[in-house]
């Protein structure tokens, strides 16, 4: 049996990294590995637990087929290491921090992936973005506008099979709802893994 790719998306500041970190131990019980992204951002930068590489290093890894998926967004390059294919072939489930804009390409490569969009109310998002201090006031407003676009596409998301998960409240509630969704969609530890 092959594992399932869980493709978590959401606007910057929606709490993807916090949700992943808080759910990490529980995900292990579902035989779910969290893949670390490779990002062309300094390792000293504040943000997710990712591998920071230079633009040249990223290009070399891409040329050498070291990425299962990769994309460019917000002035950075993002890559998901090719080792996820091995994990999936072993029957393990894999959760990645993906990009909404790259979802069609991800579905083309992994047709059975489980797309989950993490949403957050605008006022909550504004507070989170200001608190983390990574963006200027103009960049925060641009991210808030993008979040509004995410929110208005709810009906289209449902039609496309994208599950929405609200992360405006307590993180523990979002973790519980994520785990419930995964179990409901058949993501579980396999009894006999190769």
Image (spheres, helix red, strand yellow):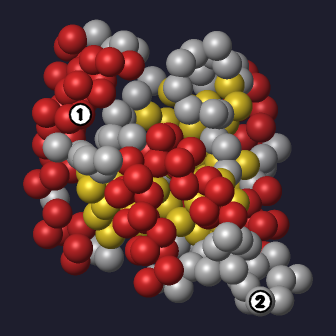
Res. 147 image quadrant: top left
x and y percent of residue 5 in the render? 59, 68
Please indicate whether residue 73 sits to the left or right of residue 144 in the image. Answer: right
Residue 10 visible in rendering: no
Q: Which residue lies most toward the right here?
A: 194
In the picture shown, does residue 150 fall above or below 111? above
For the residue labelled by badge 2, is the local secondary structure a helix, a strand or a loop? loop
x and y percent of residue 130 in the render? 27, 17
In the picture shown, does residue 33 fall above or below 41? below
Gap between marks 2 and 1 measured at Cα = 40 Å
Please indicate whether residue 135 sits to the left or right of residue 83 in the image. Answer: left
Q: Which mark is residue 154?
A: none
At 64% across and 13% down in the image, what residue appears? Answer: 44
> How many dots with numbers?
2
At 50% across and 80% down in the image, what residue appears? Answer: 183
x and y percent of residue 80 in the render? 65, 48
Circle 2 sits on which residue?
191
Res. 27 image quadrant: bottom right
Circle 1 sits on which residue?
125
Res. 138 image quadrant: top left
Name the one closer to the observer, 142 or 36. Answer: 36
In the picture shown, does residue 58 fall above or below 15? above
Marked residue nearer the N-terminal end (2 or 1):
1
Q: Quadrant of the C terminus?
A: bottom right
x and y percent of residue 100 in the render? 37, 52
Please indicate whether residue 153 sits to the left or right of residue 4 in the image. Answer: left
At 57% across and 16% down in the image, what residue appears? Answer: 45
For the residue labelled by badge 1, is the local secondary structure a helix, a strand or a loop? helix
In the picture shown, does residue 104 fall above or below 100? below
């Amino acid at each position: 049996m092959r594992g399932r790719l869980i493709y978590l998306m959401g606007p910057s500041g929606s709490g993807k990294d916090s949700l992943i970190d808080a759910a990490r131990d529980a995900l292990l019980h579902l035989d779910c590995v969290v893949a670390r992204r490779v990002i062309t951002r300094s390792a000293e930068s504040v943000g997710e637990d990712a591998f920071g590489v230079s633009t040249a290093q990223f290009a070399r890894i891409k040329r050498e087929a070291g990425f299962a998926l990769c994309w460019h967004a917000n002035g950075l390059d993002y890559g998901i290491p090719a080792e996820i294919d091995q994990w999936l072939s072993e029957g393990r489930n894999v959760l990645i921090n993906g990009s909404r804009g790259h979802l069609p390409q991800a579905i083309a490569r992994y047709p059975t992936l489980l797309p989950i969009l993490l949403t957050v109310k605008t006022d909550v998002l504004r507070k989170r973005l200001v608190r983390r201090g990574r963006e200027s006031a103009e960049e925060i407003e641009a991210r808030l506008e993008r979040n509004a676009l995410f929110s208005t596409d709810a009906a289209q998301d449902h039609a496309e099979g994208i599950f929405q998960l609200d992360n405006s409240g307590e993180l523990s509630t979002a973790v519980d709802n994520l785990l419930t969704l995964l179990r409901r969609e058949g993501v579980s530890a396999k009894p006999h893994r190769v």
